[in-house]
Amino acid sequence: MSDSSAEISAGKLAPYGALPVPRLTPDLVSLIKTGTVYSLAVIYREGILVPGPMAPYTLNTRFRHGDIRELAPASAAAEAITMSCHTGTHIDALCHIGEAQDKNGNADPAGEVKLYASPGKTVAAADQVDLHGQKHLSIAEMPPIVQRGVLLDIAGNLGKSILPDCYQITVNDVESTLKKQNTEIRPQTAVLIRTGFYQHLAAGNPACRDAIAGLSLEAAKSLHRYGMNLVGADNMSVEAVPPLDHSVHRYFLVHNGITHVENLYLEDLAKEQVYEFLLIITPLRLAGATGSWVHPIAIT
């Protein structure tokens, strides 16, 4: 795997952390029973809440129908959009989160920030960035994702439409949801967590940014033991926030090469009790970027 985005070429796919080069196998095809396609993306619009440090979403008309006279009798309109790659439904690149470590690889706020490189190995973050973005494992290196996905409706299992602010999902919450849904997590499975926090995002409630219900570190580790290789949620961070130390991000991204999909729309899957599906996600090949906007779909 290349450390330099300059060496990425169109059409070339390679494994990326825990994600393999996708292959549509008979086992994956067998997940499709009805052919129903579910959209798992939120709507991007002015005012959508984003994490505090991120640039806000803006859309401005660049030119209107009739403005470019040279095209007559044809007409065209277009716009200019600005936003962080971590706006709305998006996937994190492995270079998005680092961990300050001591010389023995232990977390240390005074240490040097390290990024995932390969199992058991890291690289210094300071050496992997320039004015054109990240040079190591940017989102441009991530292959498309075509694999088995499962939904864990944690909120529904607990009898709630939305989990309480700052709620930390426990190992027992995970296990009881798996049992209630009769859901199995196998190796090479994507696990999508429903907290109900999409409703806060849709309503513009700052709780979706400042008081996030999500995975605890212990629950994240319990999911990892099943062999899952991708995690997502209908909240802004997958994990509970606060605290702000991003322990789940560090565990998954920095130590295990497992990335996150955030701000998913999971309401329809939960309503119809769809707990297993074929998941397809295609990140944009943005050289140097720490993430990509995506429109995931689930097919049943």
Image (cartoon, rainbow, N blue to C red):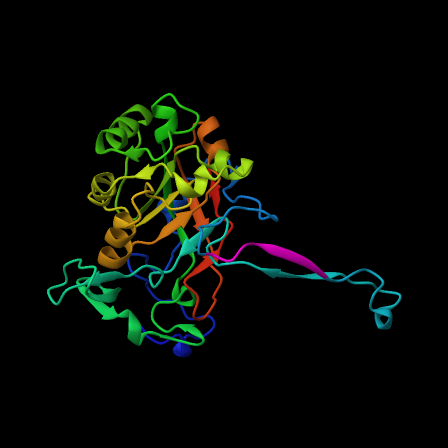
Q: Where is residue 247 in the image (x, y as percent from the top left)?
A: 25, 49
Instruction: Determine the residue positioned at 34% across, 71% down.
Output: 136
Which residue sits furthest front?
A: 110
Q: Does the magenta stretch include residue 59?
A: yes
Which residue sits furthest left?
A: 104
Q: What stretch is highlighted in magenta?
A: 54-61
Q: In which quarter of the image is residue 58?
A: bottom right
In the picture provided, is 265 more to the left or to the right than 101?
A: right
Q: Is residue 43 visible?
A: yes
Instruction: Determine the residue positioned at 27% across, 29% down.
Output: 173
Above or below for 246 versus 138: above
Above or below for 136 versus 20: below
Q: Position of residue 225 (x, y in %)?
A: 19, 44
State the quadrant of the N terminus: bottom left
Q: Is residue 30 visible?
A: no
In the picture provided, is 46 more to the left or to the right than 67?
A: left
In the picture provided, is 242 more to the left or to the right than 218?
A: right
Instruction: Determine the residue positioned at 43% across, 27% down.
Output: 273
Q: Is residue 77 magenta?
A: no
Q: Where is residue 291 in the image (x, y as percent from the top left)?
A: 43, 59
Q: Where is residue 132 in the image (x, y as percent from the top left)?
A: 45, 75
